[in-house]
Image (cartoon, rainbow, N blue to C red):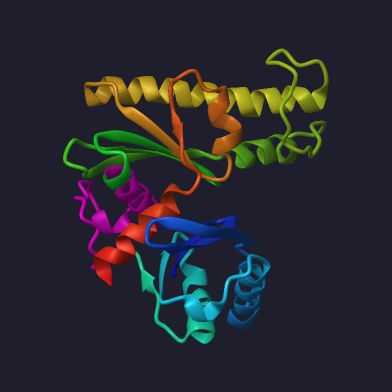
Amino acid sequence: MILTVDVGNTNITFGGFEKDELKFVSRISANMQRTEDEFAVRFLESMNLYGIDSKKITGIIVASVVPPLNSSIKKAIKFIFGKEPIFVGPGVKSGIGIQCDIPSSVGADIIAAAVATHYIYGSPSLIIDIGTATKMTVVNHKGAFIGTSIIPGVMMGLNALSDGTAQLPKISLEMPNGVIAKNTADCMRSGVLFGNASMIDGMIDRINEEFGEELNVYATGGMAGTVIPLCKHSIVLDEYLVLKGLNILYRKNS
């Protein structure tokens, strides 16, 4: 079994693949204060929860956008499995081109999602990753990454409303009854959810216009299942696109 690990700003999502089949997925919080021992315990507890024997793990690959956590994650993985993980970055074979000003600056999660989309669905494509930030990535006809737009995330916007105002409260993010809401909490939910969906629809139109043709659109990320159904464009939802890309990258580099 190959362990794929996606280290994000809010959560660490990891899953195990046997060939192309995803056997389990788990999430733990990306707490900057945790030591390598604490991460090791969290990994083991999560795997035990799904009945996964750590001895079955034959390889590990990590995509991280939080460099301060890399050392602790690496040590935790090596402690549990006795193996060095592959970290996605410069020198890792991806099979796709990186056409941007500074290729080394492209996030490992963006590369993994682009790889998965190219090899599973085909190119060209537009990939929307709705997590802590919302990233909209374009892959051209040859499968090369050609650029990304980065937008403040759904929860970032919700938290900004309450943190930056005197009277708007902290609320849970649930679906309001409609766009025209009738109480403060639902007004905030309407703005955040329908507002983000409308933003994504508008950005898809602008990206298609700039690219010169209508792209197939794929969405992933922790908030994608909440926002994408509200969009008017046809968008394929694949919640574990980054993990699937990591599995492909591991096979290319092992």
Return the residue nearer the eye: 141 or 161: 141
- Left or right of 186? Residue 54 is left
Q: What range is drawn magenta here? A: 89-118
Q: Is residue 35 above or below residue 251?
A: below
Given the current orientation, which residue lies at the most extreme top position? 180
Q: Residue 208 placed where, x, y %? A: 30, 23
- Left or right of 206? Residue 11 is right
Q: Residue 163 placed where, x, y %? A: 73, 41
Residue in the picture at 71% in, 27% down = 175
Q: Is residue 228 above or below residue 78?
A: above
Residue in the picture at 44% in, 70% down = 1
- Left or right of 136? Residue 143 is left
For residue 48, say whether it is visible: yes
Return the residue nearer the eye: 228 or 25: 25
Q: Is residue 30 above or below residue 188?
A: below
Q: Residue 76 placed where, x, y %? A: 54, 80
Q: Residue 253 placed where, x, y %? A: 26, 69
For residue 89, say whether it is visible: no
Queried whether the magenta region covers residue 26, the answer comes back as no
Screen quadrant of the C terminus: bottom left
Residue in the picture at 37% in, 30% down = 217
Queried whether the magenta region covers residue 115, the answer comes back as yes
Given the current orientation, which residue lies at the most extreme left position? 142
